[in-house]
């Protein structure tokens, strides 16, 4: 396989925002009197805001009308934005910038593919607005992972065919989205959780151009 493009998820791959999602969802779950754990939070990774709320409601066996669901989704996002508005470049995960710069030096296109509508704010806070050749987020695409839309659009923006792309993902839904897009997927995290990924690492600090070409 000739690798011409690398597509990265944002949360948990490039920056450490997963903790802020958990804090915001936990705060909302407590408000709704739903017992929500870190283990439950794994199910929310890579999932859209409304789908995440549906999972939490299912855990608590709660039913809400559409108006209330929209209200609580907005409230969660307000709390989350408050958290990420205080982010600094120190929260860029180890090895991320070094690896991306290595790819760019080798002429490999880079793109960000995230379901988050807050991607522009996060990139600005950590100083990475100009790091990628293309950025695709929830403001551009509407279908949540595991639908492959975000990765297909990202590949199109960097003008690389899916079969020449490698995706870096930390979520089960994201891994499946990459597979559905016909791309190689490098899972970042637990082999047990991300069993469908073609290759597993604990973080981008373990990845370099030589290892990438061996995948």
Image (cartoon, rainbow, N blue to C red):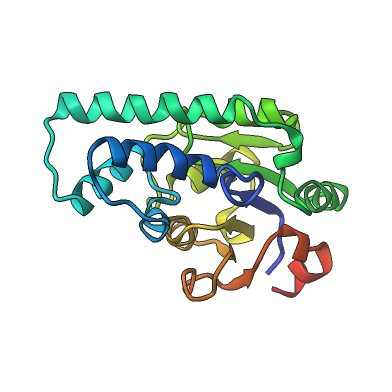
Q: Residue at x 64, y 59 (%)?
A: 164
**Image quadrant in which you'd find residue 189:** bottom right
Furthest residue toward right: 105
**Image quadrant in which you'd find residue 52:** top left
In the image, residue 66 sits, relative to residue 172, either above or below, namely: above
- Percent x, y of residue 110: 70, 45
The residue nearer to you, when weighing 80 against 149, is 80
Quarter holding the C terminus is bottom right
- Percent x, y of residue 147: 38, 50
The residue nearer to you, when weighing 143 against 1, is 143
Q: Residue at x 40, y 53 (%)?
A: 41
Q: Residue at x 58, y 61 (%)?
A: 163
**Image quadrant in which you'd find residue 180:** bottom left
- Percent x, y of residue 143: 36, 41
Quarter holding the N terminus is bottom right
Instruction: Locate residue 121 relative to residue 105 in the image: left or right.
Output: left
Q: How many marks?
A: 0
In the image, residue 146 sits, relative to residue 129, either above or below, namely: below
Q: Residue at x 23, y 42 (%)?
A: 33
Instruction: Locate residue 124 relative to residue 108 in the image: left or right.
Output: left
- Percent x, y of residue 141: 43, 34
């Amino acid at each position: 396989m000739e690798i011409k493009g690398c597509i990265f998820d944002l949360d948990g791959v490039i920056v450490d925002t997963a903790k802020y999602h958990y804090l915001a969802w936990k705060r909302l779950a407590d408000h709704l009197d739903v017992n929500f754990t870190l283990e439950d939070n794994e199910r929310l990774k890579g999932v859209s805001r409304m789908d995440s709320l549906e999972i939490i409601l299912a855990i608590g066996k709660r039913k809400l009308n559409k108006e209330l669901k929209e209200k609580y989704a907005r409230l969660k996002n307000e709390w989350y934005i408050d958290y990420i508005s205080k982010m600094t470049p120190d929260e860029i995960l180890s090895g991320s910038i070094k690896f991306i710069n290595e790819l760019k030096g080798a002429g490999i296109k880079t793109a960000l593919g995230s379901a988050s509508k807050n991607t522009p704010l996060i990139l600005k806070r950590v100083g990475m607005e100009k790091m990628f050749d293309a950025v695709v987020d929830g403001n551009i695409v509407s279908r949540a992972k595991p639908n492959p839309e975000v990765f297909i659009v990202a590949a199109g923006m960097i003008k690389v065919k899916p079969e020449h792309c490698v995706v870096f993902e930390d979520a089960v839904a994201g891994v499946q989205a990459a597979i559905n897009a016909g791309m190689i997927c490098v899972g970042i995290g637990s082999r047990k959780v991300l069993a469908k990924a073609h290759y597993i690492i604990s973080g981008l600090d373990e990845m370099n151009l030589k290892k990438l070409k061996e995948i």
